[in-house]
Image: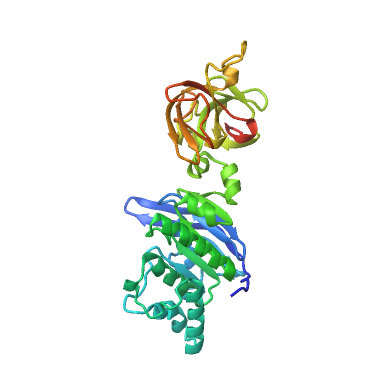
């Protein structure tokens, strides 16, 4: 089970338009995507963003309006689902209640007419790998939710599919079991070397298991990259806001590379991206429509807090940071989280520190600061 299955998935201009009583609705809009052999790729986004529809078109469960789907230079769009050799795992497990674990896991192989000896050997091997050894004679009703999901994974992998597709497979499990199962899925996928497409709305889940992630919004693939790259350098306000926690400071473009944050704090972020008119309006950016409009984004772990009265003689307040007031301090063990209200940000600022910050308490006036290399600027007409 160590062999690498070669083959790249290539999706070009993939589009799905649904006809509704209100008129045509574009669920997936000209998606372009390449997934390498053996890669674990997650389609991530909120409900209704088009990620599941994209997966279903690749699986053949939904007909594409336009675009192409190719694997190993073979056009999958023209093939029925049964001829695409894909293994799929659903949120609902979809096990046959009247069949044993062995019979459920062997279903795909038996439909394909595989010899009984091969079926038994392959299924027992997979069940052992998935931690289900000795349970082959049980029925789904005798299994926990995590065990049932393992059976559905065994069924999807038993006939050695070219691709492994998972649609919100852990949504029905409790939080602790989800963490265990996502690690198990990642381990099995890497052991088998099969290309995997994983649909989820859970950003932590996607970040923890994926080689790369594609972030969707309203049918559009907004950004593709490794988890750390997307977290560090989101190219739009939506992706920045959706992946992890982030603070948005109102700003305006200044001379050269400078950006002035509300409150007079000047910065020159090294990472810079275009601020679209649509996002400026959606996020109610101050000065939206102006070529000088800007937003500066900083992760909570990169924002510093200084008491407002802790200033050197002759130092202007504006040069020391954005003025605010601490509303709440939460000690969470591994970190302390501060919530700061300020007119300089688009919403309440969150600051996370590995340990409590000395002399900073609830109700205190403070200054917020950050380094240029930790900030991202989104600039109108950039």
Instruction: Give percent across and percent down for residue 378.
Output: 57, 34
Query: For the point 63% across and 70% down, which residue is it?
Result: 6
Q: State the residue lying farthest toward the top.
A: 314
Q: Residue at x 51, y 54 (%)?
A: 206
Please name the colour scheme applied to the rendered image: rainbow
Q: Does residue 199 sit above or below 280 in this rendering? A: below
- Residue 320, placed above or below residue 314: below
Residue 313 vs residue 272, the one in the foreground: 313
Position of 222 relative to 314 (above/below):
below
- Tally of marks: 0
Quadrant for residue 297, please give it.
Answer: top right
Single out the residue that lies furthest toward the right.
256
In this picture, residue 341 sits left or right of residue 207? left
Residue at horizontal 51%, vertical 84%?
121
Residue 269 visible to an observer of this rendering: no
The one nearer the camera, 233 or 373, is: 373
Q: Report x, y in % for residue 291.
A: 57, 27
Residue in view at x 57 percent, y 17 percent? 318
Image quadrant occupied by the N terminus: bottom right
Percent across and percent down for residue 217 are 47, 47
Residue 260 against residue 174 in the figure, above or below: above
From the viewer's side, name the closer residue of 258 and 19: 258
Residue 202 appears in the figure:
yes
Whole-percent x and y of residue 263? 53, 20
Query: What quarter of the picture does the C terminus occupy?
Result: top right
């Amino acid at each position: 089970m160590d062999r690498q299955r070669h083959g790249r998935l290539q999706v070009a201009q993939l589009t799905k338009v649904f006809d509704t009583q209100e008129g045509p609705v574009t669920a997936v809009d000209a998606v372009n995507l390449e997934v390498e052999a053996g890669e674990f790729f997650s389609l991530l986004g909120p409900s209704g963003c088009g990620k599941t529809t994209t997966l279903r078109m690749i699986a053949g469960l939904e007909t594409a309006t336009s675009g192409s789907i190719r694997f190993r230079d073979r056009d999958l769009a023209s093939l029925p689902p049964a001829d695409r050799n894909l293994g799929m795992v659903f949120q609902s497990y979809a096990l046959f209640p009247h069949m044993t674990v062995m019979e459920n896991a062997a279903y795909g192989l038996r439909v394909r007419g595989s010899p009984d000896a091969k079926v038994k050997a392959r299924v027992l091997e997979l069940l052992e790998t998935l931690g289900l050894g000795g349970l082959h004679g049980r029925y789904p009703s005798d299994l926990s939710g995590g065990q049932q999901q393992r059976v559905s994974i065994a069924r999807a992998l038993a006939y050695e599919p070219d691709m492994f597709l998972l649609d919100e497979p852990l949504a029905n499990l409790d939080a602790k079991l989800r963490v265990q199962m996502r690690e198990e899925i990642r381990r099995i996928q890497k052991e088998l070397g099969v290309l995997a497409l994983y649909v989820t709305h859970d950003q932590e889940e996607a970040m923890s298991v994926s080689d790369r992630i594609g972030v969707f919004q309203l049918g559009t693939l907004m950004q593709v990259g490794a988890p750390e790259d997307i977290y560090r350098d989101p190219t739009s306000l939506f992706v920045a806001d959706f992946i992890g926690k982030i603070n948005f400071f109102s700003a305006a473009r200044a001379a050269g590379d400078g950006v002035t944050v509300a409150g007079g704090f000047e910065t020159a972020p090294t990472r810079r991206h275009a601020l679209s008119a649509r996002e400026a309006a959606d996020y109610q950016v101050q000065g939206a429509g102006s070529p000088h409009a800007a937003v500066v984004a900083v992760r909570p772990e990169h924002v510093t807090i200084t008491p407002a009265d802790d200033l050197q003689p002759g130092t202007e307040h504006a040069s020391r940071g954005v003025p605010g007031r601490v509303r709440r301090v939460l000690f969470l063990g591994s970190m302390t989280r501060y919530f700061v209200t300020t007119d300089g940000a688009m919403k309440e600022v969150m600051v996370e520190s590995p340990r409590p910050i000395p002399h900073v308490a609830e109700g205190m006036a403070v200054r917020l600061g950050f380094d240029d290399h930790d900030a991202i600027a989104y600039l109108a007409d950039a």
